[in-house]
Image (cartoon, rainbow, N blue to C red):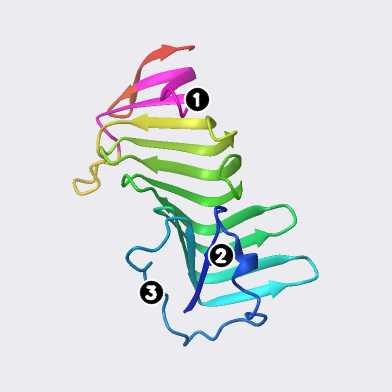
Amino acid sequence: MLRLTCVATAVFALSSGVAAAQTPAPASAAEAAPPAAGAPEDEVFLSARDLVVDEENRTYTAEGDVEVRVEGRVLMADRVIYDLDNKTLRAQGDVQIVDPDGGVQFADEIEMDDEFENGFATRFSSRAPNNVLIAAKSAVRVEGVSNTLDQVVYTGCPVCKETGDASPTWALRARRAQQNARTQMVTYQDAVLEIKGVPVLYVPY
């Protein structure tokens, strides 16, 4: 595994840490160690099986069990691509982002800027520490505050897979939802309340 350590406030400021890594790292390299105790909170740690530096297109591509840790947040994916010119990060394949509070976001693919202010995710879902689950076909984040989700399902009940029942006790489905990260207010459009998978109430807003 490959380990890179650099001090940055950006999510993936690799430019200061990979100058010597011009070729893919061998798969047999040592696994990345966790951040040392007392390390600065803005340090970025990256582990991956391979790292490819494309100097012509000014991109870094980490592949294979990629893990990025910064400011208490952990990002895991099959592949992570960082574009130096556009300062954008793209994570692909079984993407997971674990927040310091224990919340987890999942997606097939996420593209965002290096400040986590703006981004886009496909097949997005989020699980809060209190087991609240929200899933959407796509999610768009703007200015770090507003989240727009399409084809949304929200529930506060666990899904009983052990009993063979894949439907939660209740769920709210909506064509679109708008979430304000500051106020924690969520508004729904064309919402349907389902009980055990059966629609029982429709509310346009």
| Drawn side of residue 183 relative to residue 64, left or right | left
Q: In which quarter of the view is residue 134 placed?
A: top left
140 or 1, nearer to the observer: 1
Q: Is residue 31 above or below residue 120?
A: below
Provide the residue designation for mark 1: 177
Disc 3 is placed on an element classified as loop
Residue 93's place in the image compared with 53, above or below, is: above
Q: Residue at x 49, y 62 (%)?
A: 44
The part of the chain drawn in magenta is: 167-193
The overriding secondary structure of the stretch rendered in magenta is: strand
Residue 14 in the image: x percent, y percent? Answer: 61, 65
Which amino acid, by three-letter code, is at mark 3?
Answer: Ala
What amino acid type is highlighted by mark number 2?
Arg
Q: Earlier in the sequence, mark 2 or mark 1?
A: 2
Rendered location of residue 36, percent (x, y): 35, 69
Label 3 sits on residue: 33
Is 17 drawn above or below residue 149 in the view shown?
below
Badge 2 crowding class, 10 Å Cα cut-off, few under 14, some 14 to 19, many 20 or more, is: many
The label shown at residue 79 is: 2
**Residue located at (47% from left, 19% from top):** 188
**Whole-number angstrom distance, CA of label 2 to CA of label 1:** 29 Å
Dots 1 and 3: beta carbons under 8 Å?
no
Q: Residue furthest right?
A: 56
Q: Secondary structure at mark 2?
A: strand
Q: Earlier in the sequence, mark 2 or mark 3?
A: 3
| Spatial separation of the CA atoms under disc 2 and disc 3 | 19 Å
